[in-house]
Amino acid sequence: MSEHVEYEARTVRPYAVTGGRVRSARSDLPLEALVEVMPGAVASTGLTPEKRAIIQHASAGYISVAELSALLHLPLGVVRIIVSDLTDANYVRVHTSQPVEVNTGESPALSLSVLESVLNGISAL
């Protein structure tokens, strides 16, 4: 196989895994988002090799989206789509560091000021 054909195969194949999709509902997952396998997912059948590999890597503990991309030798965008698909199918759960909304019944700015006051109070102890 010529070098050009091998390059094309490596370039096209990852996007064939996603059905040609370059975005998904959660395709903006942060690099540091942690993937956790849900109970029973490891025993699942009928998954693509890439989905199976993600579940296997994540079954030992939390693993980041970036680490999965490196381990699977797949572009980050492709891994984000596969992880999104696995999340939608309840095989994995994704944990991000995005701020959690605090419902105080007040405006978001007030919620932030309340949290800052609590942090300052704790720091003063």
Image (cartoon, grey):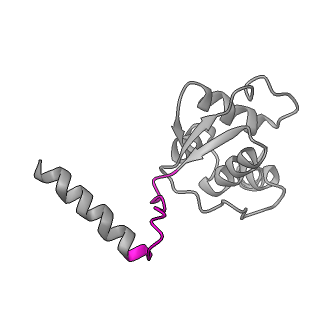
Vertical comparison of 59 with 8: above or below: above
Left or right, 117 with reference to 81:
left
Along the viewing direction, whichever of 49 and 104 lies nearer the viewer: 104
Along the viewing direction, whichever of 6 and 72 lies nearer the viewer: 72
- From the top left corner, tell me how far across and down residue 5 is, in percent: 77, 52
Left or right, 31 with reference to 89:
left
- The magenta segment: 96-109
Vertical comparison of 37 with 17: above or below: above
- Residue extending farthest to the left is 124
Q: Which residue is drawn at 52% across and 49% down?
A: 33
* The image quarter in which residue 12 lies: bottom right
Q: Which residue is drawn at 44% across and 77% down?
A: 107
Vertical comparison of 10 with 59: above or below: below
Along the viewing direction, whichever of 48 and 112 lies nearer the viewer: 112
Left or right, 92 with reference to 13:
left
- Which of the image's four quarters has the N terminus? top right
Question: In the rendered structure, does residue 45 fall within the stretch colored magenta?
Answer: no
Q: Which SS type dominates the magenta stretch?
A: loop
How many dots with numbers? Answer: 0
Question: In the rendered structure, does residue 97 fall within the stretch colored magenta?
Answer: yes
- From the top left corner, tell me how far across and down residue 51 is, in percent: 74, 38
- From the top left corner, tell me how far across and down residue 30 is, in percent: 52, 57
Q: Residue at x 44, y 65 (%)?
A: 104
- From the top left corner, tell me how far across and down residue 97 is, in percent: 45, 53
* The image quarter in which residue 110 lies: bottom left
Q: Residue at x 81, y 61 (%)?
A: 20
